[in-house]
Image (spheres, rainbow, N blue to C red):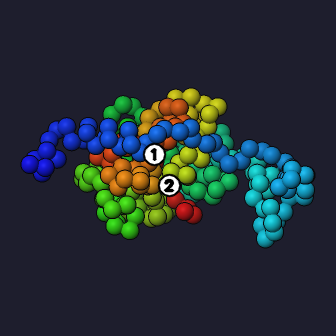
């Protein structure tokens, strides 16, 4: 009886509501870690010289020396001028991560092009060491594992280590100076005002976390739902 119910059309709706109620609890996502602070302080609040990495109190925002948060990159990973009209990747100069930039936001899905901004995917990870105990929903080219495989097989940007971002990495893209989408559209111009998957599993294995760039909130959903995906590479 249970197997028949699980195959019913209402299965995705049931589990989606279940996880939304029990483990989502939308919270406001943070913005970029670099707030342009110039001074450092100790635990008493006294101003002190900014410490190098090997000493105590290293890590305040002032220790970052970033004049430009993002850099546009060409298909070989080389820097482009900030005025460039077309770019396939963006580098975060604070974290060092390189992000895929979506293309062809025309309202038509095209799974032959993994960079198409309109494509949506179910969450799927066949690796038992990273899928939280549930692989999710395998769906040919329309799941996140297939999306990443397409980028890595093609050696997009000269790399084969593209992955889904962790929830923390994805949250760092949120910029509350922008609305619907809440992201810097000068560098990520075709990001949807919608939910994007992260690689982070929810506390219950049927769900995974992500960020809704409509308002910059994070939350978790049932892995069988179709949402957007953005690839990243670099230190995890």
Residue 30 horizontal/vertical position (percent)? 61, 42
Secondary structure under tag 2 reads loop
Task: Identify the residue shown where x is 81% and y is 69%.
Answer: 55
Residue 92 horizontal/vertical position (percent)? 63, 51
**Quarter of the figure that contains the C terminus:** bottom right
The answer to which image quadrant residue 186 occupies is top right
Say whether disc 1 or disc 2 marks the residue closer to the N-terminus. 2
**Could you say which disc has been placed on residue 235 in the image?**
none
Residue situated in front as seen by the camera: 50 or 193: 50
Residue 156 horizontal/vertical position (percent)? 45, 58
Is 84 positioned to the left or the right of 45 in the image?
Answer: left
Alpha carbons under labels 1 and 2: distance apart: 8 Å
Dot 2: few (<14), some (14–19), or many (≥20) neighbours within 10 Å? some
Q: Which residue is mark 1?
A: 210
Is 180 positioned to the left or the right of 44 in the image?
Answer: left
Residue 75 horizontal/vertical position (percent)? 52, 54
Task: Identify the residue shown where x is 8% and y is 48%.
Answer: 1
């Amino acid at each position: 009886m249970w197997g028949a119910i699980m195959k019913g059309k209402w299965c995705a709706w049931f589990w989606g509501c279940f996880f939304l109620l029990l483990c989502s609890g939308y919270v406001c996502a943070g913005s970029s870690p670099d707030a342009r602070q110039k001074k450092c302080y100790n635990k008493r609040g006294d101003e002190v010289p900014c410490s190098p990495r090997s000493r105590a109190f290293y890590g305040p925002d002032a220790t970052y020396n970033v004049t430009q948060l993002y850099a546009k990159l060409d298909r070989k990973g080389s820097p482009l001028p900030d005025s460039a009209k077309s770019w396939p990747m963006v580098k975060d100069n604070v974290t060092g991560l390189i992000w895929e930039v979506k293309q062809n936001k025309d309202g038509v899905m095209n799974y032959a092009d993994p960079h198409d901004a309109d494509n949506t995917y179910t969450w799927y990870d066949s690796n038992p060491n990273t899928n939280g105990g549930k692989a999710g929903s395998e769906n040919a080219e329309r799941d996140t594992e297939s999306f990443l495989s397409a980028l890595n097989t093609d050696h997009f940007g000269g790399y084969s280590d593209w992955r889904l971002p962790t929830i923390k990495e994805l949250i760092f893209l949120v910029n509350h100076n922008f609305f619907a989408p809440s992201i810097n559209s000068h560098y990520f111009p075709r990001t949807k005002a919608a939910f994007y998957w992260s690689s982070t599993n929810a506390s219950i294995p049927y769900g995974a976390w992500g960020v809704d760039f409509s308002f910059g909130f994070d939350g978790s959903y049932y892995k069988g739902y179709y949402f957007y995906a953005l690839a990243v590479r670099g230190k995890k």
